Amino acid sequence: NAGVTQTPKFRVLKTGQSMTLLCAQDMNHEYMYWYRQDPGMGLRLIHYSVGEGTTAKGEVPDGYNVSRLKKQNFLLGLESAAPSQTSVYFCASSWAGNNQPQHFGDGTRLSIL
Amino acid sequence: DAKTTQPTSMDCAEGRAANLPCNHSTISGNEYVYWYRQIHSQGPQYIIHGLKNNETNEMASLIITEDRKSSTLILPHATLRDTAVYYCIVRVVSGQGTYKYIFGTGTRLKVLA
């Protein structure tokens, strides 16, 4: 059971380039989340999804887009990367309903030059 | 949103109990307290959560004060592998019937041999 898998693990981009981060979960969870973590800080929520075909904004959504075309996948896109988006990105998933903990992947380390 | 306050760092001798405090004085009645830990730069690992009663599982115990303004995570017999950053998180209701985690900066626990 792989849990939550993030692809790629590392990436370096130039300012203005675009890319997509992929999150896949094999636990049949309804909810999925994207966070970013900057040095010395806790995680901040970017976007989340409560089901296939639905997405919503979190605390820091600007500069990012997401899609959830399949239940098991949640994609995070950067249309025009900026140095301020250099961060570690974590994906998480959980069951729907009250009292369900989120399960996290091991992150994607993204550097924007 | 409720926020948490934790000590920046703590040390604990191997084999001893590690008691990690957390203040969440603005927590609302229906907001849960969750604890996660992050080892090196891996994804956060779920430990335990609670609302108002004390909780125990195979990893740890969670003690929540009667007024719910603070809590303590207890690792009963700390090992070197418990060295990590521990996050006390308040889970608040978000849109679309889901929840979001409000992360603080965490406590860096170092278990000493």
Image (spheres, coloured by chain):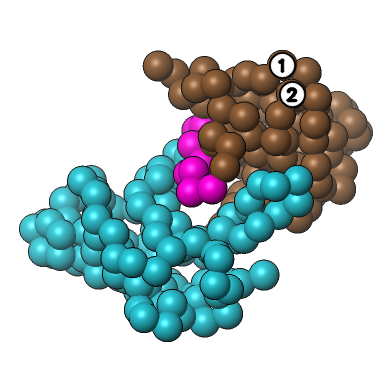
Chain colours: A brown, B cyan
Whether A103 is among the magenta residues is: yes
The quarter of the rendered structure image containing the C terminus of chain A is top right
Please name whichever residue, B20 or A97, is drawn nearer the observer in this view of the structure: A97
Q: Tell whether B71 sits left or right of A84.
A: left
- Tell me the tag on residue A52: 2
Element type where label 2 sits in the image: loop
Residues flagged by tags 2 and 1 on a common chain: yes
Please name whichever residue, A56 or A6, is drawn nearer the observer in this view of the structure: A56
Q: Where is residue A23 in the image (x, y as percent from the top left)?
A: 63, 24
Mark 2 Cα shell of 10 Å, populated few (<14), some (14-19), many (≥20): some
Which residue, given by chain and number where applicable, does mark 1 sit on? A70
Residue at screen point 41% across, 43% down:
B45
Marks 2/1: CA–CA distance: 6 Å
User: Within the image, what quadrant is residue B31 found in?
Assistant: bottom right
Q: Give the dominant element type of the magenta stretch: helix, strand or loop.
A: loop
Chain of the residue under label 1: A
User: Within the image, what quadrant is residue B46 found in?
Assistant: top left
Element type where label 1 sits in the image: loop
Looking at the rendering, the stretch of residues picked out in magenta corresponds to A98-106
